Amino acid sequence: MKKYIICCVGLLFSALTFAQELEATVEKDTTQLDEVILIGQRKLSNYRQEKTLSSIDNYLEKSNRITMIKRGNYAWEPTMNNMASQRLVVTIDGMQVFGACTDKMDPITSYVDVSNLEKVSLDSGQEGTENGHCVGGGIDLQMPQSKFYGSGLKSSVDLGYETNGNYKSAGLDLEYVGNKFYINADGIFRKSDNYDAGDNNEILYSQFQKYNLSLQSGYKLSDNHVLDANIIYDKATDVGYPALPMDVSLAEAFITSLTHTYKNDSTRIKSWESKLYFNTITHIMDDSKRPDVPIRMDMPGWSDTYGFYTKATLKESKHSLLVNLNGFYNRSLAEMTMYPNDSNQPAMFMYTWPDIRTLYTGIYVKDGFALTENKTVSVSARFGYHNNTIAEEVGLESLQIFYPGLEDTKSRFLMSLSADYTIKKDEYDAAFGIGYGERAPSVSEGYGFFLFNSFDNFDYIGNPNLKNEKALEANLAANYYVNKFKIGFETSYFYLTDYIIGEVDTSLSAMTIGANGVKIYNALSHASIFDFYVNSTYEISDAFSINGTVGYNYGKGSNDEYLPFIKPFSYLAEINYSRNLFNAALQLHGNGNQTNYSSFYGENETASFAILNLNFGNMFYLKQNKLVLKYGIENLLDTKYSTYSDWNNIPRQGRNFYMNVSFVIN
């Protein structure tokens, strides 16, 4: 540990020295390393146009750094910088929420909808540690801020239909905004049958149904003090997962919070926000609709989280300081009951997550120092205490079979350090950053018990004795502007030590019928991940513009094997036409052949593909009201394809005609 602390302090010192030496040549502001995705439901956007009722998954997939792992038509798992969700910190408005599924069928992003959110903040690597520890980055799904405009009562209705899968969606929003009080209630419903891949091949068990309800309200206590209360209820039923051996009969979440906010531009403390929150998730896997399985199973899971944070922003001279003290207590429990086909045989029961209690508290500090009007150095740090307790005695005894002498409690100390230098001028901007971070093993990695992974066909057993996973990172980004042309690049490199991944234990027998064997979570001495993207935009005229992106990614472990789920060469080309009340976009995107795949981890070669999309949008004003139409064709040529991130090569959706209608009543 000491050598990493010394190394990180040295890196931070070097970054500050490097920043001052480059003061005449490199620059950019503090937002350059961050990315914000605005979720404007009813905006007539002209860049990577979204349907009014696009899911959060569709929004996230537009980012270079984000890829969604698809196990079906619902609840895609976000990855960032080629790292899966256990290496990220995913929060809802700063709140820690943990899924209740041992198979990652319920990522946090599946429990909110576009109606709940205003924007999504994406922060790469150690820039993403404001709300918790990670090595890959942070995703914060942010709800709308308080509003007291006195605009009165407003409402809106959203309707959507897509031909592929007979997909129907509908949303209703009611809002009252006064000078001291506001309240917003909204709901959204989505239902899809099985979708068709290219060439009209039906993908069985890809149906789903969900609805999401939310209530947000606030009261202005004084000019500087506001109290907000938020409730989200999300329920999905009859969710099929064609790439997995089981489906989901219920995925249900209740998320609530109470927030106090203080703002005052005339004092050193510009803002101070404190939140208390609670969320509970129930997730039930079953195979009752599968016609032929070796053995019937029920696999319910539960996750309850209590938490808080209090964060303040301060401004003193050239310093901008952010301090965030937060903590949470989580209970994760999952079990499995197996029913033999012979009714005379007894059912078998075990805990797959043996009631793991996680207690965390930590503090985050970030200081942005303005060297000049256009040049900034930022330094941040997070330190935290992390404790796991196995509350279920039977679960503890089961793990002690593999780890004799295992105690029921494990404590860890985690830290994160980062620094970046940015500059922004009229003709160019640039940023350079470095960082060091640690994360604790996830509940599955530390305490999972015979978790079946259908991707590599192995059962997995957790390892409570794993060390913290660590990452050193460096990133660089720059953009250059010439008249109406912009070109830029972004790149990052991660060197991870004690990289957690499953390793085969030939001395153990699989629990799952047909599994290849058992893997125990262990750690490679190191692994490396690299990415590089070039982005360009050219405004041909006031109406026409073109955009293009190409990317390259690489990842390998100390065992000389390629890491799984590393994105191959990718590209996007887009031409847009936009006027005040109409726009259109033609998009071409695809991946190259996945040659650096890892058969060692269950991957196989994925062929290259290219997809064409055609999108349109119209806006109409009916007195003071507004009508927005968005319509188009996805996968115009009905290409049959799957990507490297499609679980077990499940084919993606074929040709799809869609239309979304939004009516806003003022």
Image (tube, rainbow, N blue to C red):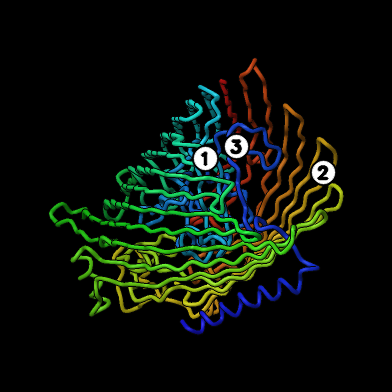
* Crowding at mark 2 (Cα within 10 Å: few <14, some 14-19, many 20+): some
Q: Judge by depth and name the residue closer to the eye, 266 or 211.
A: 266
Residue under the point 74% across and 58% down: 373
Quarter of the image where one finds residue 587: top right
Q: Nearer the viewer, mark 2 or mark 3?
A: 3
For marks 2 and 1, give the CA distance: 33 Å
Helix, strand or loop under label 3: loop
Locate residue 210, reporting x and y percent: 41, 37
In the picture as drawn, the residue positioned furthest to the front comes out as: 266
* Crowding at mark 3 (Cα within 10 Å: few <14, some 14-19, many 20+): some
Residue under the point 59% across and 67% down: 379
- First of labels 1, 3 by sequence position: 3
Locate residue 235, reporting x and y percent: 37, 39
Amino acid type of the residue that numbered disc 2 sits on in the rendered structure: Glu
Quarter of the image where one finds residue 34: bottom right
* In the image, residue 82 above or below residue 178: below
Amino acid type of the residue that numbered disc 3 sits on in the rendered structure: Gly
Q: Which residue is mark 1?
A: 145
Locate residue 187, reporting x and y percent: 44, 31
Helix, strand or loop under label 2: strand
Q: Which residue is mark 3?
A: 40
For marks 2 and 3, give the CA distance: 23 Å
Q: Judge by depth and name the residue closer to the eye, 399 or 227.
A: 227
* Crowding at mark 1 (Cα within 10 Å: few <14, some 14-19, many 20+): few
- First of labels 2, 1 by sequence position: 1
Do the CB atoms of the residues marked 2 and 3 lie less than 8 Å apart? Answer: no
Locate residue 532, reporting x and y percent: 68, 64
Q: Is residue 19 left or right of residue 334?
A: right
Q: Nearer the viewer, mark 2 or mark 1?
A: 1
